[in-house]
Image (cartoon, rainbow, N blue to C red):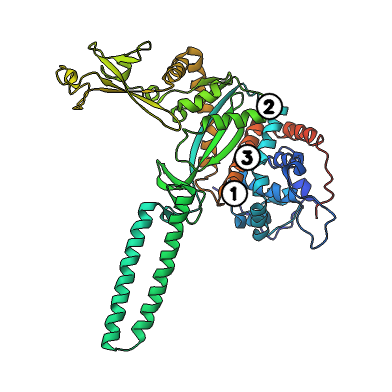
Amino acid sequence: MAYRYANRNQLQLFPSSIEDYIPLDDPVRAYDAFVEALDLEKLGLNLDPHQAGNPQYHPKVMLKLVVYGYAYGIRSSRKLERANHHNLSFIWLTSGLTPDHKTIAEFRRKNRSQLADILKQCAKMCIQLNLIEGNTLFVDGSKFKANASIKKSWDKKKAHKVLKAIDQRIADILNQCETVDEAEKGCGSLVKMDQELQDQDVLKTKVQGILKELETKKQTSLNTTDPDCTRINSLAGTHAGYSVQSVVDEKHGLILSADVVSENNDLNQFSRQINQANALLEHKCQVACADSGYASTTELAKIDQQGIKVVVPSQRQASEKIPSPFAKDQFSYDKIHDCYICPEGHTLTFSSLNKNKKNGHKHYLISAKKICLACPHYGVCTSSQHGRKVIRLVNEELREKFEAQYKEPESQAIYRKRKAKVELPFGHIKRNLGVNAFLLRGLPGVKAEASLFGTCFNLVRMITLLGVTTLVSLLKEIGGKYPTSLGGIG
């Protein structure tokens, strides 16, 4: 079979302008049109084409570079710089301008709060284009590693352990110094010991500062590299990280809002995330759905009180385990007398109230422990020497309401859509784009990156739904509604 050969020295006839290099249906044109449609003044970017001093790159150029790079998993400032020299799409996007990696990194660092609001404008555009309805919203969270090592995370136990070791080492150094003084042997070792003693004192001061900060902020742990991150437990192990929260619309699976929190679970996030999404919609959704990780009765109640239907299974419903014959649900509750009746007909009366900031619990005990000890089911129902105890939430009726609501056929149909809608964006970000950790540190930085992730996913979906040429024309119409005075690109 013959081979194909090429000659690098052969003359080629290329288009005379950069514009001719990119076809009209190339996806890069959609990203260009999106940034052109953004209201930069509302975004908070400083626009002054007549400012004095050395000319700088226009914010739109930098935004296009960052957004397009993130859309294809290119986040490093050095990789963005390289792509801007060698990738034709990037060259077209920036009109041939070549900001270096320091300029790119500085732009991203200085405009973290502005980048964090890009997703809001993107969602507003989707609402204008009737791609987001806001009737049914799905909430989900995913854990991402922080740009910090778990070894730099400190808690009180670790701090006290290190302080104890430092004190012991200081005592050892002082004892060695006394021994050397008595023997009057050379000074070389004394100089080394003095330096080590000083190093130990510096370390002790640092650890004491960490302990003080833990007590002041009332935190369980503190990472010295990124103080805003927390200890995250995931399938990938334990690491320093953040939880990214996403609210997705049912119609086309577009992200309405994204947030980042320093928490290891989702229990406290349901009402906050739904309220943020509703604020962007400027109206209340009809249904709010999430998995059992959000099953905090207090949180669900905050949304239920607004007249929004809540579709969230309890932990018990999610486990789908067959309840034992002596599970709490097998005990009947007497609301009038505020007591429980066990399957054998014995009464468990109210004992105490355990007050909790989130959920209060009421404890019910068997009237006499000898009843349980003499029961043929002792050891199966309970093995406690004090007899059976049942714990009931203060708002137990609300929990039962949400469980019954989840079982409704209509709710089941909604819940079946959850995975396909709300977990798809995280799959795209983590698998397709290869994102498993943030590059920036601190909550402002990671929120900016999360906003970029959400924006890029929405743009990919919009291209799929509308096509490049249609989307570009629609974005141009939207962009015309924003009054700007940008001047030329400098």
Q: Which residue has dot 1 on it?
A: 445
Estimate the x, y position of residue 439 in percent, counting from the top left. 55, 51
Inspect the image, locate mark 3, and give the three-letter code of the amino acid beneath it. Cys
In the displayed structure, would residue 337 be above or below residue 65? above
Disc 2 from disc 1: Cα separation = 27 Å
Inspect the image, locate mark 1, and give the three-letter code of the amino acid beneath it. Gly
Q: Give me the disc on residue 282.
A: 2
Q: Give me the disc on residue 264.
A: none
Report helix, strand or loop for mark 2. loop
Q: Give me the disc on residue 456.
A: 3
Mark 3–mark 2 CB contact (< 8 Å): no
Number of marks in the rendered image: 3
Along the line of sight, which residue is nearer the eye, 393 or 121? 393
Estimate the x, y position of residue 13 in percent, counting from the top left. 77, 52
Disc 3 from disc 2: Cα separation = 23 Å
Inspect the image, locate mark 2, and give the three-letter code of the amino acid beneath it. Glu
Estimate the x, y position of residue 210 in percent, counting from the top left. 45, 57
Q: Dividing the image into 4 quarters, which one contains the C terminus? A: bottom right
- Residue 114 sits in quarter: top right
Numbered disc in front, either 2 or 1: 2
